[in-house]
Image: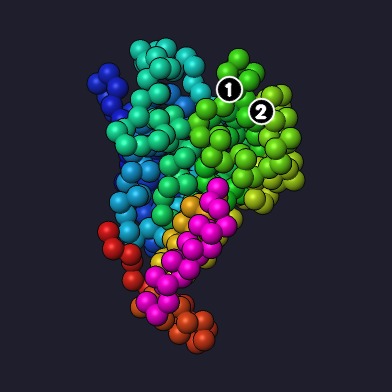
Amino acid sequence: MAVMEKRAGAPARRVEVTIAGHVAEVRLDRPDKHNALDYEMFAAINAAIDRLAAEPSVRAVVLHGAGPSFCSGLDLAGFAAGGRRFGDMFSRREGEDANLAQRVSYGWQLLPAPVICAVHGSCLGGGAQIALGADVRIVAPDATVSIREVHWGLVPDMGITRSLPRLVRFDVAKELVLTARTISGEEAVRVGLATTVSSEPLAAARELAAEIAARSPDATRRGKALLERAWGMSAAESLALEEELQRELLGSPNQVRAVEAGMGGSPGDFDDPPG
């Protein structure tokens, strides 16, 4: 399924979503602009997140970019040409914490299914913040990564407070934000911005997604939810959450199938969660 957003007559494709074998792929699809973020791209990424949130068959998501880069950040000229103001990015839906700009990063954390991001080429500014919203980041060794906003006299405001503090030391986070310096994929792994390095990040992301999709979706969804929800909880709250989620799983049909598959050394045949 391709997610489209209309502008001045003709449709402009920004994001393509495909689903096969319980794995969804979300491809930023503006390769001639290094997948730079104009308003239509923000809207299309949000539409893709909405689509996947409503897909119970999806057990893992691969997020990547078409062309030479993952995402080169904001398309400043594109905003102006489209007649948009940056203030439009601060709109939010009723009852939601994140505004439109923040949701393209934070929204991946809210998806039930784990999200693996494959990063190559430029991953700058808003692009870096989108990648940080994923559960796992696999980067090319020569990728260029930068939390770039201070370079333009701004602060990172696309969900950075819900991702960066979990990944790197506080002083490292400050250094990366305050200098806006560009680091390689290999350094991104060393400092904690990325999970692992691969010369073929998309192939590695697809392999990991297939491995996760072969597990019980009840367990993988709750495993992600456990870690997401427990961050910032007190000990009493997080320990109670562990017990709550485990009680939901014990003896359930998919949990029994997981045991049978594990004991028999065969792939599990799992039911999708309710829609």
The reply to whether callout 2 and callout 1 are in contact (CB within 8 Å) is yes
**Closer to the N terminus: mark 2 or mark 1?**
1
Q: Is residue 48 above or below residue 243?
A: above
Is residue 237 highlighted in magenta? yes
Q: Residue at x 62, y 40 (%)?
A: 165
- Residue 120 visible in the picture: no
> Residue 149, image x and y in percent?
60, 22
Mark 1, residue position:
155
Mark 2, residue position:
177
> Majority secondary structure of the magenta segment?
helix
Query: What's the residue type where badge 1 is placed?
Result: Val
- Residue 155 visible in the picture: yes
> Residue 172, image x and y in percent?
73, 36
Horizontal side of 28 relative to 145 (left or right) equals: left
The segment highlighted magenta reads 232-252
Q: Residue at x 74, y 35 (%)?
A: 171
Q: Secondary structure at mark 2?
A: helix
Q: Residue at x 63, y 29 (%)?
A: 147
Query: What's the residue type where badge 2 is placed?
Result: Val
Q: Secondary structure at mark 1?
A: loop
Distance from the alpha carbon under mark 2 to that under mark 1: 8 Å
